[in-house]
Image: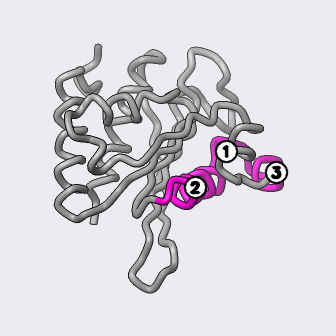
Amino acid sequence: MADNVPSDGDLALLATRAGQWLLARGMMVATAESCTGGYLAKLITDVPGSSQWFRCGFVAYSNEAKQRQLGVSAATLAEHGAVSEQAVIEMAIGALIVGEAQRAVSISGVAGPDGGTAAHPVGQVWFSRTQRLDNGSVGALAIQRRFNGDRDAVRRQAVAVALGMLMEP
């Protein structure tokens, strides 16, 4: 694997650190995943004691699942697609609300080796993190990354970014 692709040990350490960060702040987290297929939730639940800070995870691989499980609107998917800023924000908000969490992270992208288009090439991944704010509203941010490598490399890099987002203030 390439040097920038995290190893199993790197990912385990990131998940442990994310858990410590969330636990120290009394936050419960929920996840919403598409292209990573539950990899993020698996890494989190590999951490002993993760039930103290992990509420639930959703694997919404199809557009129908994104709508049914997380409340992503059909209009968003039709206008922007599943691999978009708008879709990941709605996924993360859905995970936050349905999961009754204080923080949520979502991932949607094209892991490859096929499925890429000119607009959404293989390796393009969108992320969102949402959080309940003190005033009762929900704050959201979204970022896009482009990763190189095979399907496993893209997915490993994606979950590493998502774990890092969980620890951002």
Main secondary structure found in the magenta portion: helix
Depicted 114 relative to depicted 109: above or below: above
Please identify, in this view, whether the residue under mark 1 or under mark 3 is nearer the observer.
Answer: 1
Q: Residue at x 50, y 47 (%)?
A: 106
Kindly identify the amino acid type of the residue bearing the numbered disc 1.
Gln
Identify the element where label 3 is drawn: helix
Residue wearing tag 2: 98
Tell me the element at label 1. helix
Q: Give, as a three-letter code, the residue at label 2.
A: Val
Give whichever of discs 1 and 3 has the lower sequence position: 1
Q: Is the residue under label 2 in contact with that under label 1 (CB below 8 Å)?
A: yes
List the residue tagged with mark 1: 69
The C terminus, quarter of image: bottom left
- Dot 2 and dot 3 residues touching (CB under 8 Å): no
Which residue corresponds to mark 3?
Answer: 74
As for residue 78 lying within the magenta part, the answer is yes
Please report the bounds of the magenta region as a residue range: 75-100
Left or right: 72 in relation to 128? right
